[in-house]
Image (cartoon, grey):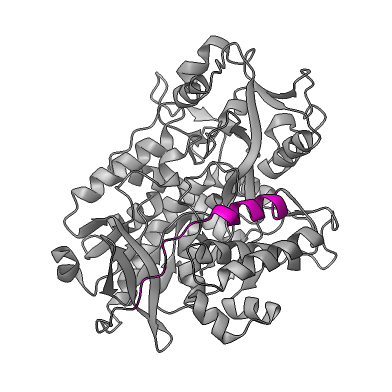
Amino acid sequence: MDSIAQAAGCPIVIGAGIAGLMTALRLAPEPVILLAKAPLGSGCASAWAQGGIAVAVGADDTPAHHAADTIAAGDALCDAQVVERITAAGPAALADLLELGAVFDRASDGHYKLGLEGGHGRRRIVHTAGDGTGRAMTAALIAAARRTPSITVLEGVEVQRLIVEDGAVTGVLAAADGKPVVLPTAGVVIATGGIGGIYRETTNPLAAVGQGLALAARAGAALADMEFVQFHPTALAVGRDPMPLVSEAVRGEGALLVDAAGRRFMADYPRAELEPRDIVARAVWRETAAGRRVFLDARRALGSRFAERFPGISAACRAGGIDPAVDPIPVRAAAHYHMGGIAVDPEGRSSLPGLWAVGEAASTGLHGANRLASNSLLEACVVGRTVAESVAGAMSRLTRPRPAALPKLPATARADSVRTIMAHRVGVLRDRDGLTAAVDALASLAFAPGPEADPALVGLFVAAAALQREESRGSHARTDFPNHSSAGPRRSRLRLADITRLLDVDDRRVAVGT
């Protein structure tokens, strides 16, 4: 750990997916520590992204068209200025990725091969090796980071608490080789990804339990839009945990959703299988809740071409005993993406001085109540640059903190019982009784010592925000409040203090949990 001492005081990026890597790369030549609890390229959802990156580069497309589709999918909850800024920056972000070594699929005339996904009015999904975009982008950025001398990469280091003094971040408490270590810094960027691992059925790595959100919340930062969890309608249902994803791009190529009898249950919807994800996920959920199995049938649309177009998905299907060229693919809805996260301003700054967030861990306002497919990789790349510029400008004005004493390490996070609570009570369809029961069960874990405290705290924020939102909007669907609120769209914002007041939890119990 000599490299820690050498880089002490410089910015720290927690998380080495695409958002974290892009932030660290755009900080160059300023020194930065990039922390990853697993070896680079493993354990991050970025590498699992199949669909691609949404960018308006087609001859019939513009960033304005892209922005309009994004806002429509977000169900009136997007920040229009954020949407316009990020979609407009798409072509430049693609150029950045090419400069850093990424390669994308092109047709024989040199133009990008553009895919179509739900909610998009035009083909604008740029991809690599068919369904290998996330893996290829992550590999390119890892290679770029390893050859950048200003980036100190520390693998096998898990941050377990932010250190806050006088209302500002002064360092992080981490576990390295099972031992506590404090890294002093005045600037931390959380890029830890999503929360899918707190659900029983998910397409995310099981380690994606919202650890960065728990870090921020326990340090006093505000979280926003926590109730909005996107369920992907087509997770491969072959008994694997986590569930392999069957990209929306498969439906973009003409695959149909059917039940065991071959009934196409999305046929009467205006966009059929290409409705935004929240609508398709609820349709799939209702079918399975009624005891009917759901399949994605690509036999007519792709047939023998399936493996060529989607090699990764084909391999996952075959490992589960399914040949998508001749068999319908069994699917279920599963937790996939979180629109909520750490509340940030347009520069990625949280409400806590010295703390930034980027990627899925942040709530920027881009996605609103329902993310438009393949906008997440775009957000990670565009906002990664913005956050890097903000951090670099702020660090020059901040006093480097003194090293702190070594506190006791909390238990390593585990989400076993949390996953069951979230699946049964805070899933695709919600109601007051289920959410109230979830809040009670999660609070007993979140404010007690133990490995489930942090995942339970994240789930508690989701359940509490869902309980307070007495309407259905985007990915948040209440069976007891099936319509939009007459009060109009509003974003939600909660701090740990708000949760404790809601539950009438005393300070002693909160301290035990932290």
Residue 381: x %, y % from top left? 41, 51
Q: Quadrant of residue 430?
A: bottom right
Magenta segment range? 407-427
The quarter of the rendered structure image containing the N terminus is bottom left
Give the camera-side residue of 466 and 445: 445
Residue 422 in magenta? yes
In the picture shown, does residue 104 fall above or below 211? above
Q: For this view, does 17 lie left or right of residue 115? A: left
- Asked whether residue 116 is in view, the answer is no
In the picture shown, does residue 245 fall above or below 214? above
Q: For this view, does 396 lie left or right of residue 443? A: left
Q: Quadrant of residue 472?
A: bottom right
Q: For this view, does 75 lie left or right of residue 202? A: right
Q: How many marks?
A: 0
Instruction: Say which residue appears at 74% left-offset and 63% top-offset.
Output: 437
In the picture shown, does residue 119 fall above or below 236? below
Residue 187: x %, y % from top left? 34, 73
Give the camera-side residue of 45 and 132: 45
Residue 390 in magenta? no
Q: Quadrant of residue 340?
A: bottom right
Residue 217: x %, y % from top left? 52, 72
Instruction: Say which residue appears at 67% left-offset and 64% top-offset.
Output: 441
In the picture shown, does residue 112 fall above or below 26? above
Residue 103: x %, y % from top left? 34, 33
- Asked whether residue 446 is in view, the answer is yes
Instruction: Say which residue appears at 57% left-offset and 49% top-offset.
Output: 337
